[in-house]
Amino acid sequence: MQIEVPVVYQFECFRKGKKENKKYMGLLRQDKLDLCKDNNPNFKYSLPIQLQTHIKWEVEEYNQEEKKHYKIVSFKFQQVKQINENPVAKIITFYGDDKTLATLKEHLRNKIIFQRIQDFYTPLQTLGKGASSRVLLVRHKNTENYYAAKCIDKSYVNETENGMESMFQEIAINNDLDHPSFIKLHAVYEGDNTFYMVMDLLEGKSLHEELNNHKNGFSEDIVRNIMWQILTGIEYMHEKQIMHRDLKPENIMLLRKDDLNSLKIVDFGLATYCNANKYLFPKCGTPGYVAPEIANLVDKTYKYDKVCDIFSAGVIFFKLITGKDFFPGVGFNLVLKLNKQCKIDLTPLQMKKVDPSITNLIQKMLEKDPTQRITATQCLQDPFFIPCYQESSIQGPAKLTAFQKKQMFSTCGKAFTTEFQNENQKGSPQDRIENKGSFITQENSYRPIYQNQQKIIQKFNTTEFDHIDPTQSPSMDQVKKRFQKGDPIQEEDEK
């Protein structure tokens, strides 16, 4: 007997008929949205809750206190029906009050891809560009809050092996991470040529840039604070059975300028679920930080463990204290070679007269054998982090609830500017061939825009936001191929 998934949101809406409006009851569950005619328990329309599903929200402009505001008046989706044995796409429209539809939209964010981002956000500036994506500074039309919109070229996604699957996985992972160590993904939209991921903004530098200003490393207290934030984030991520696979200082950002208490782990383009049947991009990461079991991977079907992230964190730990790279070398090939060999040399720690207990902790994190490497929870239980427990009046990481962990960090405010930075880290032709489909590292990472840089930022024209045709979504591509030339996609009338 099939068990019905509980309803998470119930609402009233209606369809416009030729003579009168028809009332409907919406029943939103985790796996589907059912729409039933009033007083009829059997649904007439059902929409699967998945990223392949698309919804278009219709908005109207109105004035309030001499300011323009926008309200949602309806939502549309498409369904394919067989008419005379031919598939015909019908556009289904439902109407409702703004509060109800806004609540529905909030429930569906990051679970369904929305359309017409320009109805909700105003693009202000192009903050940065990469080979396959760019980042825009956008402002929400009603709240006037600022966000970053990561814009991913659809042609790149469609032409890259596992491109769509990889993007959907990145969205799902971001949606699963509700913790102070991670930025929030607010919504995903699709345009004619672009996918838009609307995220929190970051005003601070990357940890990489902070390290550039501290060539000899940080003090022990600062390192403890930084590693506590990173490791509590990793611990939470691993509890969710997610591994990042590209942890490095460039992917650790400051939410607020010069505030080392506001660290965020970013860029989940290479992250994966530990229990995935098959890892996308199994051999990936950044030379100098990637775990040796990944750098030396031969069998692409081998399921390595999430402690690969602990190795990367150990390398970051080492650099925070010494200011030096753990695998020193010039050029992609040499660093990768040293990374593969993974000869553990902690001499720089001894030269800095670092407490032996700290050296011992780093050595456990950098254990070449992943079966002997310690976990994030074990790292946090090390005496090195006792001051962090004392400050928070908490006995240990295993005792922390999700709420308590949130209280350990400052409240995260909205920031205003970010920029993507091209890393330009490419290997030789031989190395690129060896690692084809692997050692994929994102060409972009967050970096802040400062006042003296504003003059080089071009204003972004609002007309450049793509307009989405409801027939252009990936879910319709196969259907369209079956349409005969001239077959219409019609709005279905309520009878």
Image (cartoon, rainbow, N blue to C red):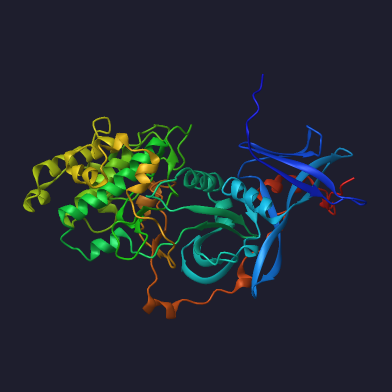
Q: Nearer the viewer, residue 281 or 134?
A: 134
Q: Nearer the viewer, residue 351 or 408?
A: 408
Q: How many marks?
A: 0
Answer left or right for 192 relative to 361.
Answer: right
Determine the residue located farthest toward the bottom in the rendered image. 455
Answer left or right for 266 relative to 186.
Answer: left
For the point 32% across and 43% down, the residue is: 232
For the point 46% across and 76% down, the residue is: 457
For the point 51% across and 66% down, the residue is: 136
Answer left or right for 352 relative to 430.
Answer: left
Determine the residue located farthest toward the right in the rendered image. 19
The relative height of residue 452 versus residue 412 in the rendered view (above or below) is below
For the point 45% across and 32% down, the residue is: 275
Measured as percent of width and height from the top left, residue 403 is found at 39, 42
Measured as percent of width and height from the top left, residue 416 is found at 44, 67
Can the viewer see residue 372 in this picture? yes
Q: Nearer the viewer, residue 463 or 414?
A: 414
Answer left or right for 147 relative to 389.
Answer: right
Can the viewer see residue 283 in this picture? no
**Could you tell me which quadrant the C terminus lies in?**
top right
Determine the residue located farthest toward the front in the rendered image. 65
Measured as percent of width and height from the top left, residue 206 is found at 33, 61
**Picture quadrant where residue 328 is located:** bottom left
**Could you tell me which quadrant the N terminus lies in?**
top right
Measured as percent of width and height from the top left, residue 492 is found at 84, 49
Q: Nearer the viewer, residue 28 or 270?
A: 28
